[in-house]
Amino acid sequence: GIPTIVNICKVPVGPRYLKAHPPTKVLAVSTYVQDYLRRAHGVQSTVVNPIVQFKAPPPPPQPLFITIFNPVEPKGGAMFRALAATLPEHRFAWVPGWDVLRGPAGGFDPVVCEAICRTIDIQFRGRVPAQIPMDLPNITRLEPVFPPHSIFQKARIVLVPSKWDEAFGRVAVEAMFFNVPVVGSRVGGLAYIVEHGGTALPKDDLSAWVAE
């Protein structure tokens, strides 16, 4: 047969995803994913971290906002809003994400979510990611752009308060590329990044986030 390489960049994956048609080689985006594959599926893998690189260098900083990307419920949107409510003297900003999951009206489309779950052999339970209202006067919406230089240029701090176990945590590395301090949850593959290049905090401890 034709040699195949599968790169696992999201977890979990279902039990048949890798065993129905075993690939020649399995890559994992982090040691966390590598450990998950070994524990959950008995699959050996090689860690290859994603390359985070942009052609243009970081622009001169113009720090204005404490910024979050994609503040849905599993990404820590509720924590972000609670911080903004607790610290009204600070300016916060959010950037919407996961456009591929959204329908024409802008909300998450259950049909698309179900199809993605099916491709990785996990059960879709009918619940789409909850969108946290960003309705406070000190919170500004920023439109997503690529490359994201203008967003990071205006960031004082990037928050990654994820509640679920991130496979990697790319946005934290991107912030570091732009010399923006990162504060993130001690979860999944994100923990390794923020513990070695940022500040790692418990995912549900609002007082710790406020103090930081």
Image: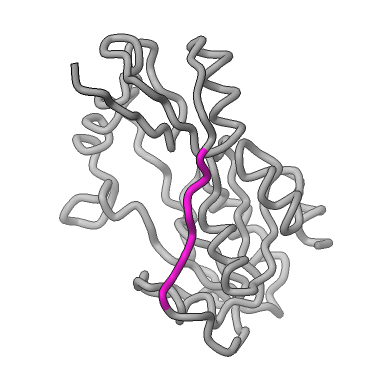
Magenta stretch? 48-55
Q: Which of 78 and 74 is in front in this view?
A: 74
Q: What is the count of numbered marks?
A: 0
- State left or right for residue 155 relative to residue 209: left
Q: Nearer the viewer, residue 25 or 140?
A: 25
Q: Is residue 65 positioned above or below 204 on the image?
A: below
Q: In which quarter of the image is residue 33?
A: top right
Residue 147 among those drawn in magenta:
no
Q: Name the residue at 72% across, 65% down.
A: 86
Q: Which residue is drawn at 48% across and 55% down?
A: 51
* Horizontal and vertical percent position of residue 134: 48, 64
Find residue 35 and report its horizontal and vertical position in percent. Answer: 60, 23
Q: Which of 164 and 134 is in front in this view?
A: 164
In the displayed structure image, the side of residue 136 where residue 11 appears, left or right:
left
Left or right relative to 175: residue 121: left
Q: Which x, y percent locates residue 202?
A: 75, 43
Q: Going 35% across and 16% down the picture, which residue do you hit?
A: 18
Whether 168 is drawn above or below 4: the answer is below
Q: Would you place residue 45 above or below residue 31 in this image? A: above
Query: What colour scheme was applied to this rendering of the protein?
Result: one colour
Q: Residue at x 67, y 62 (%)?
A: 182
Q: Where is residue 63 in the image (x, y as percent from the top left)?
A: 62, 84
**Image quarter hosting the N terminus:** top left
Which quarter shows the C terminus? bottom right
